[in-house]
């Protein structure tokens, strides 16, 4: 730009107007360039070796019919793994996201606070069932999550009275200490009007009005304690911060930029987190030794999450597996 040089999308210099016309200098100049593709309203970039380039990501929500799926983007002031592990953890929803209203306390995740986790490894990462016994009903509430390597979480929302849907996040590292989080919602049976999606986004803390204008940073942040309100904590929410997304951000960002995991005490409720770490460590080892890491060839493109109330003697995976297959 400084001297009028022009480059094509492959990084090749195609014009060098400050050099003599007969000069071949431009043929010696090449920029680093990364191939990109636009899909689902997102620009995807591949930054690895050319000979290892995988197919463009193709999860179901990325190919949903127009109007069925919407995506937002949020800056997070912490390492990506803190967001990913929070998204794969299910037991925190019994506490951090608990609403103190009658409706909120009737939620299965508020009624049963110590889920049994069962993780089934796959060729894309894993699928896991969170099984909560509902004593009053003598039934199990089963919520099935999908983890698609390396940073996709897909979770169910079938019991939402406003319509069957699923949601999830993609945690993309900006650098070691900051992250860009892509948040998607995909309806299963009907289009999702933009206005209704924005209402849901605002209730989560990331509607259009919740961002600092011109940025992907939220108005609720570390500098204002994420708008923590003790009266709200006393009368409305287990944690006095409005918005599920804002609650997650607050807990993950207050861990610090990179949490010292040598200070942890992992229990049975952390089974999904433990499995994710094992998969990621193995992926690092695979890359170091020249192998393709798990999920690098488009695996996981045909899976969905789901949730159901099941009899206690039902084998959850067999009972729910027909709902775990993509329809789009």
Image (cartoon, rainbow, N blue to C red):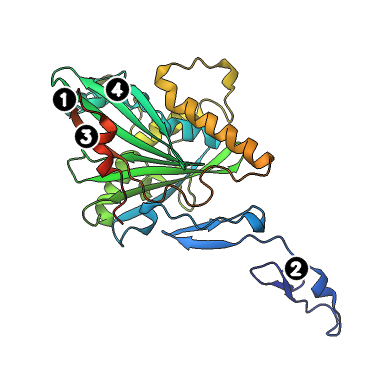
Q: Earlier in the sequence, mark 3 or mark 1?
A: 1
The mark that comes first in sequence, 4 or 1, is: 1
Position of 48 with respect to 54 (left or right) is: right
- In front: label 3 or label 1: 3
Whole-percent x and y of residue 29? 79, 68
Marks 4/3: CA–CA distance: 34 Å
* Residue 47, visible in the rendered structure: yes
Residue 173: image location, x then y, percent: 57, 43
- In 3D space, how far apart are the residues under numbered discs 2 and 4 (Cα atoms)? 56 Å
Disc 2 marks which residue? Answer: 2
Q: Quadrant of residue 64?
A: bottom left
Point 59% across, 32% down: residue: 281
Residue that carries the numbered disc 3 in the rendered image: 308
The residue beneath circle 1 is 102
Proximity of marks 4 and 3: CB atoms separated by less than 8 Å: no
Instruction: First in sequence, mark 3 or 2: give its number.
Output: 2
Element assignment for label 2: loop
- Return the disc, 2 or 4, that comes first in the chain's sequence: 2
What quarter of the picture does the N terminus occupy?
bottom right
Q: Which residue is mark 4?
A: 231
């Amino acid at each position: 730009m400084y001297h009028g040089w022009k480059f094509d999308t492959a990084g090749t210099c195609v014009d060098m107007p400050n050099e003599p016309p007969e000069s071949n200098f431009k043929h010696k100049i090449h920029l680093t360039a990364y191939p990109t593709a636009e899909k689902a309203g997102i620009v995807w970039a591949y930054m690895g070796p050319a000979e290892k380039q995988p197919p463009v990501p193709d999860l179901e929500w990325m190919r949903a019919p127009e109007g069925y799926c919407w995506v937002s983007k949020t800056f997070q002031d912490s390492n990506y793994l803190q967001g990913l592990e929070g998204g794969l953890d299910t037991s925190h929803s019994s506490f951090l996201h608990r609403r103190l209203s009658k409706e909120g306390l009737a939620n299965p995740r508020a009624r049963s606070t110590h889920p049994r986790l069962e993780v089934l490894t796959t060729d894309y990462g894993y699928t896991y069932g969170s099984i909560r016994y509902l004593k009053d009903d003598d039934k199990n509430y089963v919520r099935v999550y999908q983890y698609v390597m390396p940073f996709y979480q897909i979770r169910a929302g079938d019991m939402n009275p406003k319509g069957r849907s699923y949601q999830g996040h993609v945690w993309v590292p900006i650098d070691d200490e900051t992250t860009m989080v892509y948040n998607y919602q995909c309806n299963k049976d009907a289009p999702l009007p933009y206005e209704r999606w924005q209402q849901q986004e605002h209730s989560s803390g990331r509607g259009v009005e919740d961002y600092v204008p011109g940025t992907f940073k939220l108005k609720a942040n570390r500098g204002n304690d994420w708008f923590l309100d003790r009266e709200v904590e006393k009368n409305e929410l287990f944690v006095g911060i409005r918005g599920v997304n804002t609650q997650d951000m607050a807990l993950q960002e207050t861990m610090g930029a990179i949490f010292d995991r040598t200070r942890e005490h992992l229990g049975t409720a952390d089974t999904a987190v433990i499995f994710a770490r094992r998969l990621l460590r193995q992926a690092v080892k695979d890359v170091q030794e020249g192998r393709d890491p798990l999920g690098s060839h488009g695996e996981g493109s045909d899976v969905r999450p789901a949730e159901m109330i099941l009899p206690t003697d039902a084998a959850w995976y067999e009972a729910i597996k027909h709902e775990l297959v993509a329809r789009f």
